[in-house]
Image (cartoon, rainbow, N blue to C red):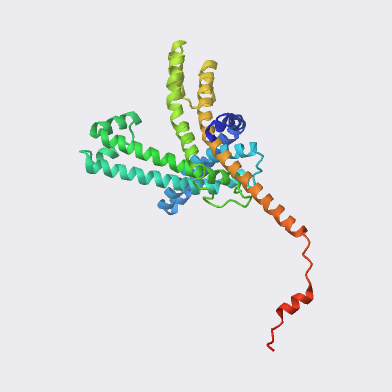
């Protein structure tokens, strides 16, 4: 079963991801810096283009970590990339825009539903933008519990389903090649391994929400909850490396554990897509090999000897006596 195979393989992705994580963070920082500069320059001449540019790069920044996880996973399956890390930019923008558009559409539908079905007005909903997530959720739940649950359930399910369906195409984009060996075709393999990938993506999303409170409970049993709370508060005021060092060694260990847990769940969804991609590639290699063997076998067989006179006689027109 793919899910059971993905769990051990996710650790193989995790350690590879940890190796490239510093480079990924540095690249995302430079990426954000370049995006801000170009968005500002575009905004000077056409504000709308500046907003579109910033939005495109913002959506791409959310897809790049996924592409990197898939790339290192496929390299672990002996798949050689045909593109560079810089080549991930184009598919990241394209697939990121698709996910962003679908998410925005769902948000707009939920927004309209609350305006039409609850006492909340457009201004009330817009005023929630700066509030914390729990505050927003509480306000919406007080307005309409049924509509809130429906919106979150349907929206979450569709977003998870879309990511699950896109994972194999994203895997192809991460290395620039499709399972059949040809250069990557957008959306090639869309929906492959959907059921298993859906479960893995669901686990990767809800897993941290379940495990982090469990870790908090365990830390509480060890009397470390107050220390963890102090670390979180200290991180909010970090503006320099010295501030980060002030968190303390034990605080950094706690943060490292939380990071490892988060990255493992993230690696879980990448593992499913990599195994589906590698499985399809292997099936296509076998089919291609069987086809080539059949052609070679047909070419090696000698042609049957035919009596040419009988052949010519059979093709001559028959005359009647």
Quadrant of the snapshot with the N terminus: top right
- Looking at the picture, tell me which residue is in the foreground, 229 or 218: 218
Left or right: residue 138 versus residue 271 is left
**Residue 132 visible from this viewpoint:** no
**Residue 313 visible from this viewpoint:** yes
Residue 315 vertical placement versus 147 (above, below): below
Left or right: residue 113 versus residue 61 is left
Task: Give coordinates of residue 308: x percent, y percent.
Answer: 78, 74
Residue placed at 43% from the left, 39% from the top? 160
Extreme-bottom residue of the structure? 321
Quadrant of the snapshot with the C terminus: bottom right
Residue placed at 54% from the left, 23% from the top? 256
Left or right: residue 235 versus residue 132 is right
Task: Give coordinates of residue 282: x percent, y percent.
Answer: 63, 44
Left or right: residue 51 versus residue 76 is left
- Looking at the picture, tell me which residue is in the foreground, 309 or 130: 309
Extreme-front residue of the structure? 321
- Looking at the picture, tell me which residue is in the foreground, 248 or 253: 253
Extreme-left residue of the structure? 119
Q: Quadrant of residue 307?
A: bottom right
Task: Give coordinates of residue 142: x percent, y percent.
Answer: 24, 31
Residue 17 vertical placement versus 192 (above, below): above
Residue placed at 29% from the left, 29% from the top? 138
Residue placed at 40% from the left, 52% from the top? 48
Task: Give coordinates of residue 185: x percent, y percent.
Answer: 56, 52
């Amino acid at each position: 079963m793919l899910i059971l195979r993905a769990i051990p393989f996710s650790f193989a992705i995790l350690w590879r991801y940890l190796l490239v994580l510093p480079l990924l963070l540095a690249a995302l920082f430079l990426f954000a810096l370049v995006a801000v500069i170009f968005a500002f320059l575009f905004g000077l001449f056409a504000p709308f283009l500046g907003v579109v540019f910033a939005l495109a790069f913002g959506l791409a920044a959310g897809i790049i970590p996924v592409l990197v996880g898939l790339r290192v996973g496929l390299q672990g399956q002996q798949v050689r990339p045909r593109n560079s890390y810089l080549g991930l930019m184009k598919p990241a923008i394209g697939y990121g825009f698709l996910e962003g558009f679908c998410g925005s559409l769902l948000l707009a539908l939920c927004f309209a539903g609350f305006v039409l079905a609850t006492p909340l007005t457009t201004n009330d909903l817009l005023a929630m933008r700066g509030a914390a997530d729990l505050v927003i959720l509480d306000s919406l739940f007080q307005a309409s519990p049924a509509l809130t649950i429906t919106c979150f359930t349907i929206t979450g399910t569709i977003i998870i389903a879309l990511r699950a369906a896109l994972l194999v195409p994203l895997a192809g984009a991460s290395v620039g090649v499709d399972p059949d060996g040809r250069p990557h075709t957008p959306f090639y393999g869309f929906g492959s391994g959907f059921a298993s990938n859906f479960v893995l993506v669901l686990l990767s999303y809800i897993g941290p929400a379940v495990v982090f409170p469990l870790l908090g409970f365990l830390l509480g049993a060890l009397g470390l909850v107050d220390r963890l709370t102090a670390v979180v508060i200290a991180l909010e005021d970090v503006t320099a490396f010295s501030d980060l060092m002030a968190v303390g060694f034990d605080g950094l260990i706690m943060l490292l554990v939380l990071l490892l847990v988060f990255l493992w769940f993230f690696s879980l969804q990448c593992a499913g897509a990599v195994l589906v991609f590698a499985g399809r590639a292997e099936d296509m290699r076998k089919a291609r090999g069987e086809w080539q063997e059949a052609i070679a076998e047909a070419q090696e067989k000698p042609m049957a000897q035919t009596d040419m006179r009988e052949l010519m006689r059979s093709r001559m027109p028959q005359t009647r006596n």
